[in-house]
Image: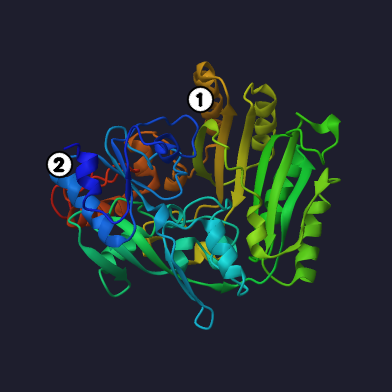
Amino acid sequence: MPFATELAADLSGQVIAPGHPRYDAARRVFPGAVDRRPAAIARVAHAPDVARVIRFARERGLELAVRGGGHSPAGHGVSDGGIVIDLAGLRRLQIDPARRIAWAETGLSAGEYTSAAGAHGLATGFGDTGSVGIGGITLSGGIGFLARKHGLTVDSLLSADVVTADGEHLRTDARRHPDLFWAIRGGGGNFGVVTRLQLRLHPVPTVLGGMLILPATADVITRFLEEADAAPEALSTIANVMTAPPLPFLPPEQHGRPVVMALLAYSGAVDVGERVVNRFRRLAAPLADLVRPMPYAEIFGPEQKDYHPVAVARTMFVDDVDRDDAQAIIDALEASSAQMSVAQLRVLGGALARVPAEATAFAHRRSRIFVNVAAVYDRPGERLRHEAWVAGLAARLHSGDTGAYAGFLAEEGQDRVRAAYPGATWDRLRAIKRRYDPTNLFRVNQNIPPAAELGTKAA
């Protein structure tokens, strides 16, 4: 009996194997360069299904991948020749507006969760894209539009339901299995399959948010970051320094020229937010100003369902971006031959930084600016050229901060995983990994190998 058929006989959910009419759609993930062919995709119906698939894969020595929203830059939501646990069917959401708590299954997207919570004037901060799965972004930390005011997504995580490598169902929080609760707040999917999250909701009825596009000069970039750092914590910003795409609301003469395509979100009184945003508007005459009061759920914008970019990128933290660095970004953009090149700059701080670094597995609380350098292209033969461009600009911007954000890592090797989990964080995660997944069943991720024995240091 083919093992896909054998697996299907034991599940309430659906098993999709090669030859199924929906197989190609089911194996597709967000990154356009990922083209893997799993032997079976298990679209689980509930947590017991998850446990059955885990046991099935473990007993047969099969590679196991877990898919939420499919946005992993490394394509970790799909296996080549193994089994995929597809969480898309886990979509139940319970919102208690009086207690400001939500129980959410991890097949939900950030946009779906945010729209439902927004009906009550409440929100949990995820990232900046509505189509990402809430499980993946939460487990990696969650840097988004509410980070400076309410912290990372993991700072709003109250408890989680996890199915471990032996098929056991655990509820973890600050009291129950606290080591596991510490590890999943930034340690990714290394410790089990998280099927449900209990999340704190914050009052966010309206935000002053949207896109502000400014001409990119060294002065504008540095002053933008200074203003973002000095702004009230209610404001979070993303400055995408890039060549302007041919957007209909941009003057044609600006197409292809360097711009700061900024996304702003002020989660407070709109009149105060207007005064804060005006400081950015005065940096230069805006080329486009789409900032307005809106329900928080609208900050994500419309999704392009068939958008699967092919890109290379480098994630990092930096201590500062001075005028010379800003000019280097502009010069690099003008020299790039990619379809789209960008240096994304996010000023951190605020509530995110007030949590002790050792409180969660996300260890970069004191980092000042989160940077992602990326090049999107459409011709596979150009990859090496764009990799060199990304590496060169990233090296130019590198400062004293050696960290990396696990949620934005591609397949970059063990040293880069170590950069995401520095020092004692790495040692502690390896010890917890040994406790909950000693055979490293959950290894299709930014992998943290189990310690050989508790307390063992990494080689």
Element type where label 2 sits in the image: helix
Q: Residue 188 carries which label?
A: none
Q: Work out whether 151 lies above or below 347.
A: below
Residue 282, image x, y percentages: 84, 52
* Crowd tier of the residue under label 2, counting other residues whose Cα lies within 10 Å: few below 14, some 14–19, many 20 or above: few
The N terminus sits in image quarter: top left
Q: Quadrant of residue 445?
A: top left
Marks counted in the figure total: 2
Q: Residue 60 carries which label?
A: 2
Residue 21, image x, y percentages: 41, 36
> What residue is pinned by disc 1?
387
* Crowd tier of the residue under label 1, counting other residues whose Cα lies within 10 Å: few below 14, some 14–19, many 20 or above: some
Which kind of residue does numbered mark 1 sit on? Glu
Cα–Cα gap, marks 2 and 1: 38 Å
Q: Which sits in the foreground, 220 or 109? A: 109
The C terminus sits in image quarter: top left
Identified at 48% across, 56% down, the residue is: 142
Q: Quadrant of residue 51?
A: bottom left
Residue 69 in the figure: left or right of residue 175: right
Q: Which of marks 2 and 1 is nearer the N terminus?
A: 2
Which kind of residue does numbered mark 2 sit on? Arg
Residue lying at the far top of the rendered structure: 381
Q: From where the camera sits, is residue 441 visible?
A: no
Element type where label 1 sits in the image: helix
Residue 178, image x, y percentages: 28, 68
